Amino acid sequence: MPKMDYGKLAQEKNDANTVENLPIIVYMSIVCSAGIVGNFVALLFYVSRTNKSSATLALTALSGNDFICSVVLLATTAGLVHSMTYTNEAACKLQGFLNHVFVMNSIFLLFILALDRYFSICKTSSWKSLFAKRKNVVCNIVCTTALSILFSIRELVFFEAGPIVFTVAENVTVIGNHCMITGEKRLAKIVTAFNIIDFIVILVIMIVMLTLYAFIIRKVSSVGKRRRATPNNIASDDSKSTEVSDISSKAVKQSPNESADVVRDRPTTIHPKTIHLSNTDHWSSTIERRLTQMVFILTLASVLSFVPYFIVSIIAQIHKVLPDLG
């Protein structure tokens, strides 16, 4: 029986897997490349602004986070191309850790932005003050980053470039390597528990975000209906004014035995008074609505940018052919 070249067999299996996974590789490459370009442009736009509101500051952090996230997720295609020949242990652990950090941080930042938009548009109690100051937003960003790292530090332990066994013929097996979560039985329950925690956290955040945006849409719609119902509302620029004069009255004094004498007071000096009819509130609410629309669009774009992370993870769990991304 001729001696088999197991390395060549593993490479052939790897090439076959790459062809099979090509649609996913192409999809990830397109989405992540679009995320890199889009978030880079958005980041430049927000960084160049001189006056940064709390929401703009959070949008800057989100754009920067999603830019790095798109770059890291694009690098995960290497795991798909080397599904049977991935041997770099350090790169595998770092890949799993960074993927998890930036995806979770993006979700947390989206949650903060949803809260900011809700409190700004719906003007709910004094909680709005928690998001109105820049230092509070910076604190929130730092906290979400720390929380994301805390959620992800486990990946440095769980990920490994482990062996995978496949059969090429009867009684002939070949061992390859790919980046995956450890298969050790002693860690299996811990891995499952962390995955359940991740799922619950993400699910709760998504439900709360959908609820908040539903309230925002209802509020904006009701305000729009009221404005359309009252088209004659006074709305002028701050530079416009109206002149109003004080008009003096005439005093009439009549004696009983004399004809009426009309005594005129001294002409009262006309004091022009300027009434400023400001549309600041209207302007502010318009800005808030536009900012909310921008946040909503970025939310959809952010979700799209890390969809590949979850798609590859699910497929990896089902087929056990693709590298597991967590």
Image: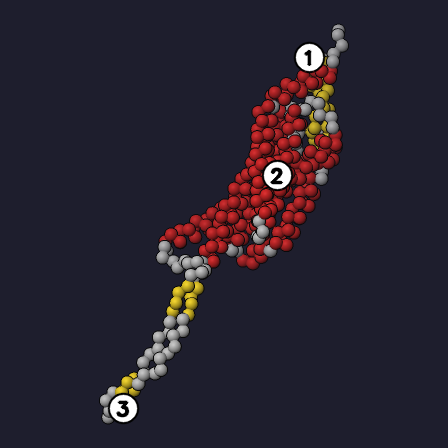
Determine whether 104 is above or below 87 in the image.
below
The kind of secondary structure element at disc 1 is: strand
Q: Amino acid at mark 2?
A: Phe
The kind of secondary structure element at disc 2 is: helix
Residue 115 falls left or right of residue 97: left
How far, Cα to Cα, is label 1 from label 2? 45 Å
* Residue denoted by label 2: 67
Q: Residue at x 42, y 66 (%)?
A: 275
| Image quadrant in which the N terminus is located | top right
* Residue denoted by label 1: 169
Residue 255's disc number = 3
Residue 173 falls left or right of residue 269: right
Residue 47 lies, in percent from the top left, at 60, 46
Determine whether 108 is above or below 14 in the image.
below
Q: Residue at x 35, y 77 (%)?
A: 248
For the residues bearing labels 3 and 2, Cβ distance under 8 angstroms: no
Residue 14 lies, in percent from the top left, at 67, 20
56 vs 93, nearest the viewer = 56
Q: Nearer the viewer, mark 1 or mark 3?
A: 3
Neighbour tally class for label 3: few under 14, some 14-19, many 20 plus, Cα within 10 Å = few
Determine whether 127 is above or below 325 in the image.
below
Neighbour tally class for label 2: few under 14, some 14-19, many 20 plus, Cα within 10 Å = many
Residue 202 lies, in percent from the top left, at 60, 41
Toward which corner of the image does residue 309 lie, by quadrant?
A: top right
Toward which corner of the image does residue 226 lie, by quadrant?
A: bottom left
Residue 287 falls left or right of residue 323: left
| Image quadrant in which the C terminus is located | top right
Q: Amino acid at mark 1?
A: Ala
Q: Nearer the viewer, mark 1 or mark 2?
A: 2
